[in-house]
Image (tube, grey):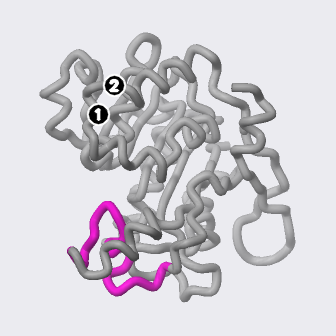
Amino acid sequence: MRARRWAALLCVSAIAACGCEGPSVAARTANSEPLGDDVQGEVARALAGDWRGAEARQRDVYRHPVETLAFFGLKDAMHVVEISPGSGWYTAILAPVLAPRGRFTVTSSFDALAKHPEIFGHVEVTSPSQLGADGSADMVLTFRNMHNWVGDHSEQQVLARVFAVLKPGGILGLVDHRAKADAAPPGAGGYLREDWVIAQVEKAGVRFVAKSEINANPRDTTDHPKGVWTLPPSYALGDVDRAKYEAIGESDRMTLKFVKP
């Protein structure tokens, strides 16, 4: 895919430096280069892999994995750490891409690791308290987890471990449910204010680079009865107003890129 098309797909902005309170970040340009041809092909093959079930494929339209990984700057020779992969939605894409030349660590196991050793056999499993040796990771990725850390008041402990495991120049890619800008900080119902999240990550020493609207959803009003879990794929209300929430789709999400100085 040509660079011009990628530029159209990626709506990126950076925060300008100012003398006010909040993230102290000079204006920067995000890494919005397309994935290299080889890596792009590997990601496309992973998306089509038969180890990904129908339910996982239904999420592709909401989660934009190719564009998201390109925005974060994924390379196939990196050491990547994925924190709290859940059922392994992104793990199933990253594992085959990183297998030939890279290294891939996740902080928890899940059923597919054992069921598909040909895909996941090389994946290293550690714990959230042991992300890896200091300065060993080129990239740390976390998808829809920050709100959980905030919920149990562990965000600064986790972010300190992220800072430690990253190499200088290493990247933190973070995606999470986005509260409205005027919501009370940090947010509620699984949603977090974007400016608040940036401030917390910078407090841990990881410098904000840029944001993208790849995973934005303007249909999401963020004021649902059961919070973000009202929406797909959770449908916390069951069949109540299911068509309404299906039409909204998955949550409005911030997509943030940070770099360790």
Instruction: Please tell me whether residue 229 belongs to the stretch shown in magenta.
Output: yes
Query: Residue at image x 29%, y 41%?
Result: 88
**The C terminus, quarter of image:** top right
What residue is rendered at 31% in x and 61% in y? 233
- The circle on residue 52 is 1
The x and y percentages for residue 59 are: 39, 49
**Dot 2 corresponds to which residue?**
49
Quick check: 78 left or right of 246?
right
Q: Name above or below for residue 76 compared with residue 27.
A: above
**Which element carries disc 1, helix, strand or loop?**
loop
Binning the other alpha carbons within 10 Å of mark 2 as few (below 14), some (14 to 19) or many (20 upward) gives some
Residue 127: mark in rendering: none
Query: Residue 113 appears in which quarter of the rendering?
Result: top left
> Which residues make up the magenta segment?
222-238
The amino acid type, in three-letter code, at marker 2 is Gly
Residue situated in front as seen by the camera: 162 or 248: 248
Q: Are marks 2 and 1 in contact (CB under 8 Å)?
A: yes
How many marks do you count on the picture? 2
Q: Badge 1: how crowded within 10 Å, few (<14), some, or many (20+)?
A: some
Position of residue 196 relative to residue 170, above or below, is below
Q: How far apart are labels 2 and 1 at the CA level?
A: 6 Å
Front residue of 207 and 91: 91
